[in-house]
Image: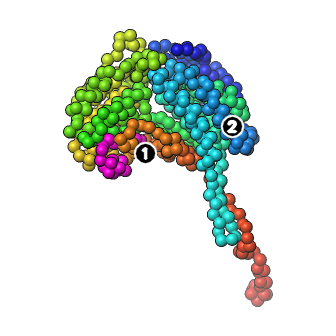
Amino acid sequence: MTAYVVRDVKHYINGEFLEAVSNGRFSNISPFTNKEINQVARGTEAEIDLAVAAARRAFDHGPWREMSVKERLSYIRKIADLIEQEAGEISYLESLDTGLPISQTKKQAARAAENFRFYAEMVNSRLVGEAYQVDEQYINYTIHKPVGVAGLITPWNAPFMLETWKVAPALATGNTVVLKPAEWSPLTANKLAEIIDKAGLPKGVFNIVHGFGETAGAALVAHPDVQLISFTGETKTGSEISRNGAATLKRVSMELGGKSPAIVFDDADAEKALDAVVWGIFSFNGERCTANSRLFLQEGIYDEFVQSLKERVNHILIGDPMDPDSEVGPLIHKEHYENVKRYIRLAEEEGAEVVSGTIPPELSEGNFVAPTLLLNCRNDMTVAQEEIFGPVMAVIPFKSEEQVLAMANDTKYGLAAYVWTSDIKRGHRLAQKVDSGMVWINSQNVRDLRIPFGGSKNSGVGREGGHYSFEFYTETQAVHVAIGEQSIPKFGVKKKQQMTASEIQ
């Protein structure tokens, strides 16, 4: 495998790679070795001000929103082409930075290129208005206009794909962008800046400020010249963003946490369901917002299914994320590793049986958590209610459809759900009653880019994806045109009568 050169990371502002104003930096740490990979420029309010000012100038006075749609989308397609050309380096940097197995990050690089191509096509085919004729007197029609400066705050799990998931529709619709990537995964965000710079976008259209949420992120959310905030991350941070953005009436879209149920009835295709739930919780090292972290098994298949789960857990390949055979790598950061381990200890305290794989001794320097099952769980346990965001799955038995529906909905989250049954009527019935933004019936987590993505309850606000992103990234303007003879009310044409002398007296 090619080992690419890793340089220190700078901000990208107004078409230039810059150090922090104060020359501040922070260390980027390998999840595999817990040693420093490189240094990253540390942004604060000063860098956010520079980036927003550049984006504001580019939007108000630059060519980006005024150029023809054809020309603007040619840049979007060029970015997609460059991502494909650099896919090897992107997947390497992503695995180095996050600990995700390279077999999985390769797919994410391909998906990132697809995001840009998809939105180039969507703007051409679906960014359309409506027109209504009123008798023979008026035509009313709508157009979609870019909103302004979009502040994009992205997470550290699958960072490159999720950055492009936001950047592509924001740019394709004519907005300018300030991206604040997660501080734990800066490498591929920097690579995206290099690719966009190579694509030749006008200065200030795309900007990146690296830094921490409480400084750079908070400054971006509060900035009065930013009209949009799109955020993916934990629910607590999302609540703070809503609060801090309210003063400037920002448009906000948020995809937050999840504690998604997978429900397997005793008439389900057990082998396919087993494949799906194992992949759904243990791929991406369990650091996936839509992971089926709660598994509900009907009593008739509970024992047999659990035995199969144990066998799978013991055979999952844990290893170096750069090894193409590795299925689970290290968690992204020591702090997150310690938090996941804390939940596993808590599960034992709450009475769950903990079944885990084994970490090879040669991996002791990394943030490895073995794939873990929490058996004999109750739905009211902390580990069945709070998002762990690691390779840990709570397994809970159920008797009836009514009982499992109540348990599935008994959580503050509502992002995703999975239903496995051969009774398709029951599948649809249950899917429509589950409190979640997305449901899969007899399927693993696969997505069509045309479909909206988002959650209910504490799992998010708004929808992105497909043409639904246009509701967030564009302003709909109504234009009314007179085309015929109209009768317009006349005001101020009647003369006031003069008062007589006697009336004055």
Q: Is residue 135 magenta?
A: no
Pick the quarter of the image with the C terminus: bottom right
Above or below 333: residue 51 = below
Q: Is residue 419 magenta?
A: yes
| Residue 404, picture quadrant | top left
Q: Amino acid at mark 2?
A: Ser
Residue at x-position 32% and y-position 41% = 420
The part of the chain drawn in magenta is 413-433
Tell me if label 1 and label 2 are in contact, CB under 8 Å: no
Q: Mark 2 Cα within 10 Å, few/some/many (few <14, many 20+)?
A: some
What is the secondary structure assignment of the residue under circle 1?
loop
**Which label was assigned to residue 238?**
none
Instruction: Report the mark closest to the observer, 1 or 2.
Output: 2
Q: Is residue 347 at all visible to an observer of this figure?
A: no
Residue at x-position 35% and y-position 11% = 361
Q: Is residue 283 left or right of residue 77?
A: left
What whole-number distance in Å separates the C-alpha atoms at marks 1 and 2? Answer: 33 Å
* Mark 1 or 2, nearer chain start: 2
Above or below 360: residue 223 = below
- The image shows residue 9 at horizontal and vertical percentages of 61, 21
Residue pushed farthest top? 362
The residue lying toward the viewer, choosing from 411 and 422, is 422
Q: Mark 1 Cα within 10 Å, few/some/many (few <14, many 20+)?
A: many
- Residue to which mark 1 is pinned: 437
- The image shows residue 337 at horizontal and vertical percentages of 40, 22
- Residue to which mark 2 is pinned: 74
Residue pushed farthest bottom? 502
- The image shows residue 225 at horizontal and vertical percentages of 65, 41
Residue at x-position 34% and y-position 28% = 392
Q: Amino acid at mark 1?
A: Gly
